[in-house]
Amino acid sequence: MAISVQGVHKRYGGKPALAGLDLEVKPGTVHAVLGPNGAGKTTAVRVMSTLLRYDEGVVRVAGHDVRTQAPAVRARIGLLGQHAALDEELSGRQNLEMFGRLNHLGARRAGQRAGELLDRFGLADTGRKPVEQYSGGMRRRLDLAASLITEPEVLFLDEPTTGLDPRGRAEVWSAVRSLVGGGTTVLLTTQYLEEADQLADRITLIDAGRVAAEGTADALKSLVGADRIVVVLRDAARLAQAARLLPDPAVDPDSLTLSFPVEDRMAGLALTLRTLQEAGIEAADLAVRRPTLDEVFLHLTDREEVAA
């Protein structure tokens, strides 16, 4: 495993932040960690990246024990926190060269690595501009490039797109996908459930410092319930009739919507369409709706707020 966390506890003043956390991340994958405020996500990242000592358990990253082999772990990981660590007055290239020198690369190698990363993240044309002229998405891509200056095996991304607009998030998502395509293992914490859905091979939902659920996005969605067929009618006068014909639907008179669970998506759609057509009932919209990760999150944590 690229990351193995077994029975980890961390307390602050007697209050548990991690309460027996277990986590395994396969090499070359994106693994997302979700959870409500105070669930322990950032604490877990700080423990795995050697920044925080833990009380009990075993943590291994890139084949090395975090407690007893911290220098070896640090040599094999990168970390991108929630806030950019860039010098606004320096250019993108100068920032990367500076990070290279701080990580004990020689001047020549630091310059080579800066050029490679600027090309990789689509910043070659702006590499000589001051960072203060960069957009939010460009800054975050540069920050991501800086975290890769030493070519880490494992990269920790702690809410990497917080505060970015949709275009900026899409730019970072593309960069993350390219990293995994090159063999990097990524552990991602995020407050955007769509982000986990888009990027993660597997997702761990934690609450109160322990795992509440773990699996693929589809597997987690199945915990909430089956797919649902959603029908929107054109004529409010036919709503009651449609409700009698369809299998015990939930009815929303305000939106003229009926919905009901279905096991076989295609067969269910075909049967519903045929039933409505035979009764002369016109649908404005007919679709299959899957449960969302938002619903999984609320269902398993019984809380309204989403992760930070």
Image (cartoon, rainbow, N blue to C red):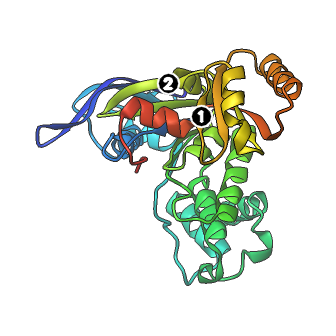
Residue 44 visible, this orientation: yes
Residue beneath label 2, please? 214
Rendered image quadrant of residue 222: top right
> Could you say which is closer to the camera, residue 131 or residue 307?
307
Q: Position of residue 258 (x, y in %)?
A: 65, 34
Above or below, comparing residue 170 to residue 129 in the picture: above
Foreground of the two, 228 or 285: 285
Q: Classify 10 Å Cα crowding around label 1: few (below 14), some (14-19), many (20 and above).
A: some
Residue 120 at x, y = what percent?
A: 76, 57
Name the residue type under label 1.
Val
Q: CA distance from mark 1 to mark 2?
A: 32 Å
Please state if 169 lies on the left or on the right of 190 as rendered: right
Write the residue at 43% across / 31% down: 299
Disc nearest the viewer among 1 and 2:
1
Tell me the residue at 50%/47% (across/down). 190
Any part of residue 152 in sight? no
Which residue lies under the disc numbered 1?
251
- Quadrant in which the N terminus is drawn: top right
Q: Amino acid at mark 2?
A: Glu
> At x 21% / y 31%, what residue is drawn?
55
Residue at the far front: name it: 237
**SS state under label 1:** strand
